[in-house]
Amino acid sequence: MTIHDAPSPNHSPRPPGCQIDTIVLHDTGAYGVLGTLAWFRSPASKVSSHYVIARDGRVYACVAEERKAWHAGASVLFGVPDLNAWSIGIELEDRLD
């Protein structure tokens, strides 16, 4: 499998000692892969994920896994805040009719 680089400027350091133990799946909605990648590349969006996966299997790496991508906003899961800090975000290309 080939992973294509599609770097986003929208990321920050993970907190010290942070353990990644969750994967969050999102969908690209009507934006598709190209629109999602363009949005992630814009500093104005303040949004990113670690990976975007196209329907045809292409994988785009947007943020290194050791960095915190900004995909879950101000979130809490299982009573733990800042889901972005301890998760990997993956965008799946939505079905476009």
Image (cartoon, rainbow, N blue to C red):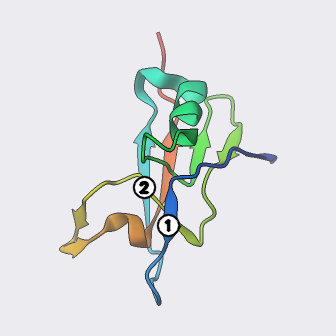
* Residue reaching furthest to the left: 79
> Is 31 rendered above or below residue 91?
above
Q: Which amino acid does label 2 sit on?
A: Trp
> Is 79 rendered above or below residue 16?
above
Density class for disc 2 (Cα within 10 Å; few <14, some 14-19, many ≥20) is many
Residue shown at the point (51%, 60%) measured from the top left = 11
Label 1 sits on residue: 12
Q: Nearer the viewer, residue 43 or 83?
A: 43
Residue shown at the point (60%, 66%) measured from the top left = 65
Labelled pair 2, 1 in contact (Cβ < 8 Å): yes
Disc 1, SS: strand
Residue shown at the point (81%, 46%) measured from the top left = 2
Density class for disc 1 (Cα within 10 Å; few <14, some 14-19, many ≥20) is some
* Residue reaching furthest to the right: 2
Q: In this view, does 59 lie to the left or right of 72?
A: right
2 or 1: mark nearer the eye: 1
Measured as percent of width and height from the top left, residue 51 is found at 59, 49
* Residue reaching furthest to the top: 97
* Real-space Cα separation, disc 2 to disc 1, in angstroms: 8 Å
Label 2 sits on residue: 70
Mark seen at residue 4: none
Q: Is residue 57 left or right of residue 44?
A: right
Residue shown at the point (67%, 44%) measured from the top left = 60
Q: Which amino acid does label 1 sit on?
A: Ser
Measured as percent of width and height from the top left, residue 19 is found at 46, 82
Measured as percent of width and height from the top left, residue 50 is found at 56, 55
